[in-house]
Image (cartoon, rainbow, N blue to C red):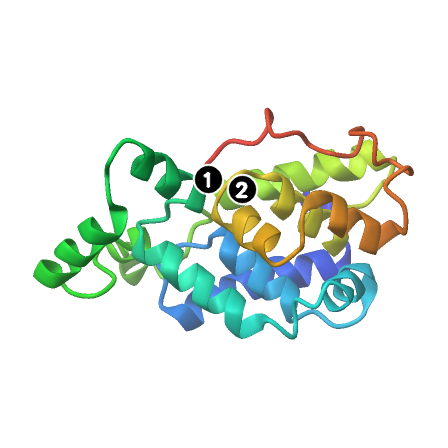
Amino acid sequence: MFERFTRGARATVKGAVAQAERAGAGSVTEEHLLLALLEQEGGRAAFAVTALGLHDRRASLDAAFAEARRRGGLTRADTDALAGIGIDLGAIVSRVEGTHGEGALDADRRGRRWWWSGHRPFRPGAKTVLENALRVALGRGDRFIGEEHLLLALTAKPGVVADVLAEHGATYTAVQRALYGSVADGGDGEGDPGQGHAQAG
């Protein structure tokens, strides 16, 4: 699959590894892929990111991801669902952090095997994004996988990154419109890897 990646898409994948390294994370996540995309210059994805105002709201994105990590990677929908059955996740997080320290529920802090191997693996969710980028490209009839396909795949995979992007106005449809000008061109679902194909990771 990687032979189909454009130079920019490969730079994004390498950038995601660098993001994980800078954060001291034990593995590469969807969040790292998005942050690497936000640092790309030139190309269709960079244009879409700028058009959607994501660069201007980088601090807000960072804060949203930090809050999600504090919740153990649960989405807002998960939090709302728990609240619906009387479980106050905020109270649980506060109690756990009071005992074990801030960020105790951050899944990536619990196992850092890379210290021994020097290698940061891609988490299942990040691998799914890469696979879905291929589906997006094939759905659009493209023979390559570019940064724009990675960006669309990030919005299509259910989870924290897609939620945070949607909260900032970057839904699959909005990103597709910013990239291609019209959702009619491949926007009837053919290019969408589909929520059913995506696996939460």
Position of 84 relative to 145 (above/below): above
- Residue at 69% x, 32% y is 193
- Residue at 80% x, 33% y is 138
- For this view, does 194 lie left or right of residue 184? left
Closest to the observer, 158 or 199:
158
Q: Which amino acid does label 1 sit on?
A: Pro
Closest to the observer, 102 or 28:
102
Which percent across, then down, holds residue 175?
75, 51
- Residue at 65% x, 66% y is 54
| Residue that protrudes farthest toward the top in the picture | 196
Mark 1, secondary structure of its residue: helix
| Residue carrying label 1 | 124
Which percent across, then down, holds residue 181?
90, 51
Query: In the rendered view of the protein, which quadrant contains the C terminus?
Result: top left
Mark 2 Cα shell of 10 Å, populated few (<14), some (14-19), many (≥20): some
Query: In the rendered view of the protein, which quadrant contains the N terminus?
Result: top right
Which percent across, then down, holds residue 132?
65, 37
Closest to the observer, 100 or 83:
83
Q: Can residue 66 be seen in this view?
A: yes
Q: Within the image, what quadrant is residue 20 found in?
A: bottom left
**Mark pair 1, 2: CA separation:** 5 Å
| Residue carrying label 2 | 127
- For this view, does 172 lie left or right of residue 127? right
- Residue at 68% x, 52% y is 151
Q: Within the image, what quadrant is residue 50 found in?
A: bottom right
Q: Do the residues labelled 1 and 2 touch (CB within 8 Å)?
A: yes
Mark 2, secondary structure of its residue: helix
Position of 102 relative to 140 (above/below): below
